[in-house]
Amino acid sequence: MSDNDTNQQDPNELKSKLIFAVVAIFMLACAKFLGW
C-alpha cells in the first residue's frame, strides 16, 4: 500500500495552515477577552 505517497501534503502548506489556524484562534480569544 503506497497510498501515503499520493496523500502526503507539502510540509510548508501544512505549516502555513497550522499557523493560520493558531492566529485565527488567538484573534478570536483576544476579541472575546476585550469584549468585542
Image (cartoon, rainbow, N blue to C red):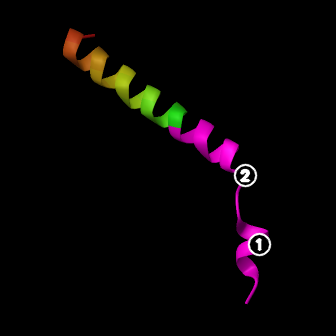
Amino acid type of the residue tagged 1 in the rendering: Asp
On the image, the x and y values in percent for residue 2 come to 76, 83
Q: Mark 2 = which residue?
A: 10
Q: Quadrant of the N terminus?
A: bottom right
Amino acid type of the residue tagged 2 in the rendering: Asp
Residue found at the very far right of the displayed protein: 6
Q: Mark 1 = which residue?
A: 5
The image quarter in which residue 35 lies: top left
SS for callout 2? loop
Residue found at the very far bottom of the displayed protein: 1
Instruction: Determine whether, in the image, residue 24 is placed left or right of residue 13.
Output: left
Residues 25 and 18: in front is 18
Instruction: Determine whether, in the image, residue 8 is placed left or right of residue 32.
Output: right
Instruction: Check residue 21 in the rendering and tell me which mark sits there, or answer none.
Output: none
Q: Which residues are magenta?
A: 1-18
User: What's the residue at 29%, 17% (across, down)?
Assistant: 30
Instruction: Determine whether, in the image, residue 31 is placed left or right of residue 19.
Output: left
User: What's the residue at 45%, 28% (across, down)?
Assistant: 24
The image quarter in which residue 32 lies: top left
On the image, the x and y values in percent for residue 10 come to 72, 52
